[in-house]
Image: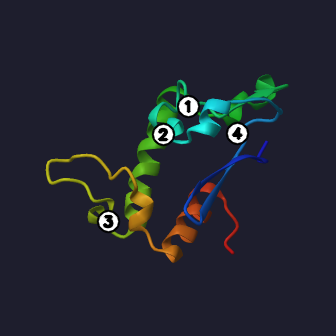
Amino acid sequence: LGQTVFTLSHGERRLEVKAPVSGTVADINEDAVARPALVGESPYGAGWVVRLEGVELGKERAALKHGSALRQWWRTEVDRFIQRLGSASSALTMADGGVLLSDLSSQIDDAKWKDLTTDFFGQPAG
């Protein structure tokens, strides 16, 4: 729980992804390792990254969000993220409410990147 399970990278930037539950890495998706874009293309399908074994969900389930609580948390986090970018225009959406850029990180300077990864992902501030 809370240990780095894998690291995402983009250019020189790194983002450590922490385990939401306890357990041991039992399997790694070699397809995602060979083709990292798969993680973004199919995060809930073919883009899975690791399978944890020995997870103690009975003890940890209460700490996990699900259902309407998860949806509300996600909406709040997206709004907070856009606000932290500095303005909604920083998210570079179309006037009709289009979609975010596929590479939003290229629009974020290094100082803002460190701030966001610390705040949203608990990364070291250094």
Quadrant where the N terminus lies? top right
Residue at 36% of width from left, 70% of height from top?
Answer: 86
- The colour style of the image is rainbow
Q: State the CA–CA distance, disc 3 to disc 1.
A: 28 Å
Q: Secondary structure at mark 3?
A: helix
Q: State the CA–CA distance, disc 2 to disc 3.
A: 21 Å
Q: State the image quarter where residue 33 is shown.
A: top right
Q: Secondary structure at mark 4?
A: loop
Q: Earlier in the sequence, mark 4 or mark 2?
A: 4
Q: Are marks 3 and 1 in contact (CB under 8 Å)?
A: no
Q: Earlier in the sequence, mark 1 or mark 4?
A: 4
Residue neighbourhood size for the residue with mark 4, other residues' Cα within 10 Å, grouped as few (<14), some (14–19), many (≥20): some
**Given the image, on which type of amino acid does mark 2 rest?**
Gly
Residue topped by disc 3: 90
Quadrant where the C terminus lies? bottom right
Foreground disc of the pair 4, 2: 2
Q: Secondary structure at mark 2?
A: helix
- Which circle marks residue 91 in the picture? none
Give percent across and percent down for residue 8: 61, 51
**Given the image, on which type of amino acid does mark 3 rest?**
Ser
Q: Are marks 2 and 1 in contact (CB under 8 Å)?
A: yes
Q: Earlier in the sequence, mark 3 or mark 4?
A: 4
Q: Are marks 3 and 4 in contact (CB under 8 Å)?
A: no
Foreground disc of the pair 3, 1: 1
